Image (cartoon, helix red, strand yellow):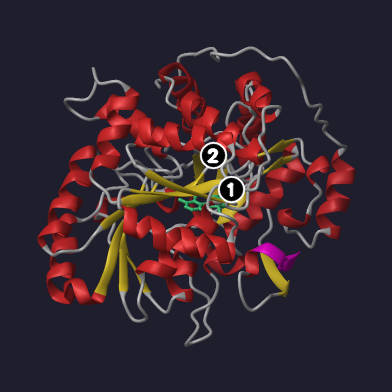
Amino acid sequence: MSGNPIAPPWRVKMVEPIRMISRSRREQLLEEAGYNVFALAAEDVYIDLLTDSGTSAMSDYQWAGLLQGDESYAGSKNYYNLQQTVQQLLGFEYIVPTHQGRGAENILFQHLIEPGQYVVGNMHFDTTKAHIEVRKGKAVDLVADVTHDSQAHHPFKGNFDLEALDAFLADKGPEQVAFVLVTVTCNSAGGQPVSMANIRSVQEIARGHNVPVYMDAARFAENAWFIQQREEGYSDKSIPDIVREMFSYVEGCTMSAKKDALVNIGGFVALRDKDLYREVSRLAVVYEGFPTYGGLAGRDMEAMARGLKEIVDPDYLAYRIGQVAYLGKKLRDAGIPIVEPVGGHAVFVDGQKFLPHIPKEQFPAQALCIELYREAGVRGVEVGGVLAGRDPETGENIYPRLDLLRLTIPRRVYTNEHMDVVAQGLIAIGERRDQVRGVAFVDEPPILRHFTARFRLV
Ligand code: F0G
């Protein structure tokens, strides 16, 4: 964690070549892409830190599992393996596989949310919020205040504000609140963990108001690792024990297996209650597939089951989160402003602080994102003013408190030398930061503008 080198607990058996194209070619491609890195071909990116989702390297054990895919339409053996793994690891009796996390959100939320109801979270992920709103529900974020201070060192910046939660549930009551959703780690807050004490209290408070609690489990193992490292009473508990305790406080979960199940595609809903399972699996038939495959091939389910077993290995987690911390330390030591403390899957660079000469109207984090590709062939992603979009009522740009560049680290993919290249790139930009130019929209799509917008340099 402290930046001491931790060697990976695996060795490399197969490689995928990557290459750095010339600077002049990168300049040209940026121009062609309308200065939006989403429009770049992945092959033209040297180090791709766009997301940790679906980008993991699978192990030989997982690849071997692909060859044992049972592609029966109903009752595939891989489904039963997956079910058994989820029962043992997470403690849920019932599982519905889905094509990815948002597929799980879709079928669970359709059943749980009535129009007009609230869904209270620490900080909902974008697709989660979208699925709540598609159901005409209202997404509410009640993360603790400290989370909004990018420099505040708190061990669990994904925690709920428990007083606010209690007051909200008391005010609205169970008729108006569909459920509480705990996102671990809290991606939108920077991959920040939620403490066991906080999860437990959320459950107690919600039970007191007759409101069920679910978990968005995408990065559950990373959260468990932080609990083991940082929370009193957990340092001598095993990761699987911590994972089981975390899930013991909730009725079920949605899972994007593209993160902490170490697969390139997949997800699931896991549940305790048989009746609820029946309802949700009926919706799965409509939107995903028969409940024993849910939009996945048998082989995908096998890789997922195997990935779930590998993710709770403490050596893996120490290296994984150590690597994210390694990049964070390099940047911090070089005086580059990052969100503190570094979370589980990404390092966030503060665009406004790094490029103070660029006004927020010219999107400094987007400018930094462009510049990092130009400088080092590295693709990060803006999580700031461009992503935030416009207020639907006033049409004005929403400028979030933090305008960030997310450097998201895929699992088991890059070495620390790659992290050195990323850090070196940002350091080089820092030395000539005055020359970095802001951006303006050339083409601004009305919704989800960050994916397809085109810009020009100001
Ligand atoms: N929940 C969380 C916390 C997520 O981070 C994501 C995806 C999802 C749900 C949706 O899962 O992509 O499998 O449908 N996050 C990715 C990211 C896309 O880049 O942070 P999905």
Q: Please state which amino acid type lies under the numbered disc 1.
A: Tyr
Quadrant where the N terminus sits is top left
Does residue 270 appear to the left or right of 11 in the view shown?
left
Residue ID at (86%, 36%): 21
Element type at marker 2?
A: helix
**What residue would you read off at disc 2?**
79
Nearest the viewer among 249 and 402 is 249
- Span highlighted in magenta in the image: 451-458
Tag 1's secondary structure?
A: loop
Label 2 within 8 A of ligand 1 by Cβ: no
Viewer-nearest residue: 350 or 342: 342
Q: Which residue is mark 1?
A: 293
Please give left or right for residue 434 compared with residue 222 in the image: right
Name the residue located 57 percent from the left edge and 70 percent from the top edge: 361
Location of residue 288 in the rendering, given as x and y in whole percent from the top left corner: 59, 59
State the residue at coordinates (26%, 28%).
230
Cα–Cα span, label 2 and label 1:
7 Å
Residue depicted at x 65% and y 48%:
73
Depicted 94 relative to depicted 360: above or below: above
Q: Which quadrant would residue 79 be assigned to in this image? A: top right
Number of callouts in the render?
A: 2
Measured from the top left, where is residue 110 in percent x and y?
44, 69
